[in-house]
Amino acid sequence: MADPDDDLQTAETEYRKSRMTVLWHVGFLTVALIFAVGVRRAIGLPQQMLGVVIIVALLVFGRDIMRFMYLRSKVARLRAEAENAS
């Protein structure tokens, strides 16, 4: 059985990587929305186009978002267990 401290350290490392991935996705989504606003205004498309951009981003990045949420709860659980053990 693995050491609880090693589990916590591994989970925190994965959590930090996942958090950076989600932050990069947010940056990409911001750029995509700015681009979509410009294209929408230039071509005269309806505002629903922006909703489509957000929905597509959630579908494409959904796995990473769910992984981030899972790792966040895992790290919180492991930290609580470590506090109770000491």
Image (cartoon, rainbow, N blue to C red):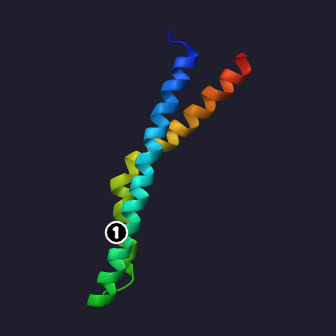
Q: Residue at x 38, y 46 (%)?
A: 63
The residue drawn where x is 36% and y is 61% is: 28
Which of the 4 image quarters holds residue 49? bottom left
Q: Quadrant of residue 79?
A: top right
What is the number of callouts on the image?
1
Amino acid type, residue under disc 1 in the picture? Ala
- Eyeballing the image, is 43 above or below 14? below
Residue 37 horizontal/vertical position (percent): 36, 80
In the picture as drawn, the residue positioned furthest to the left comes out as: 43
Residue 43, image x, y percentages: 26, 89
Work out whether 57 lies above or below 7. below
Residue positioned most to the top: 1
- Which of these two is toward me, 72 or 46? 72
Q: Quadrant of the C terminus?
A: top right
Give how far across and how far down residue 69 sits, in percent: 51, 43
Who is closer to the viewer here, 27 or 67?
A: 27
Q: Which residue is mark 1?
A: 32
Residue 74 vs residue 18: left or right?
right
Tell me the residue at 40%/73% (across/down): 51
- Judged from the image, the secondary structure of the residue bearing numbered disc 1 is helix
The residue carrying pointer 1 sits among few (fewer than 14), some (14 to 19) or many (20 or more) residues within 10 Å by Cα, namely: some
Residue drawn at (47%, 32%), measured in percent from left and top? 13
